[in-house]
Amino acid sequence: MTGKLVLTSAGRYSVRNVSDWSDKVFMAGYKLRSLAEVDQYIQKHQHLPGVPSAAEVVEQGIDAVRMDAKILEKIEELTLYSIQLEKDKLQMKQELQQQQAEINELKRLTKQLLDKK
């Protein structure tokens, strides 16, 4: 960890000049793993990518500031996944409405043809 950790009497800590804290997830060029890749990683390693396993934490301990930064990174990734799901849902809703309009038009034309007979 770079910087100085100060623990207050209220149990809070503050850190100054920490290089590990960033919003890199929202920067251009960030490679967000697909959910399929995350699933494969979890199946293989039994923990999230980039997060230490329980065994690693027991063996090495954790740096609270880096862990908070990592948790924030995971929250930011979840936010991006949620935004993409919302976009996908809206696109599917539009496609469904278009398909329903086409079905209604086909029904109308079919009825029109049947009524002529």
Image: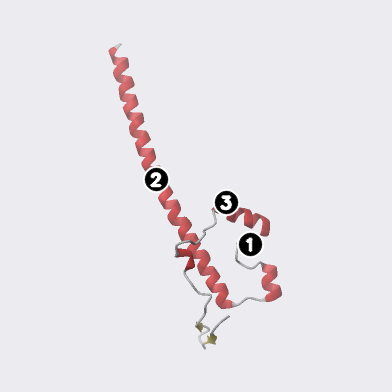
Q: Which mark is residue 86?
A: none
* Residue ranking furthest to the front: 29
Left or right position of 75 against 105: right
Residue 115 at x, y percent in the picture: 29, 15
Residue 112 at x, y percent in the picture: 29, 19
From what the image shows, is residue 104 above or below residue 93? above
> Could you tell me if the residues under marks 2 and 1 are in contact, i.e. CB atoms within 8 Å?
no
Q: Which mark is residue 47?
A: 1
Callout 1, which amino acid?
A: His
Q: Can you identify the residue that label 3 sits on?
A: 36
Residue at screen point 42% across, 52% down: 86
Left or right position of 65 against 53: left
Q: Residues within 10 Å of mark 1 (few under 14, many from 20)?
A: some
Front-most of residues 20 and 52:
20
Residue at screen point 41% across, 43% down: 92
Front-most of residues 77 and 24:
24
What kind of element bears circle 1? loop
Question: Which comes sooner in the sequence, label 3 or label 2?
Answer: 3
Q: Can you identify the residue that label 2 sits on?
A: 91
**What whole-number distance in Å separates the C-alpha atoms at marks 3 and 2?**
21 Å
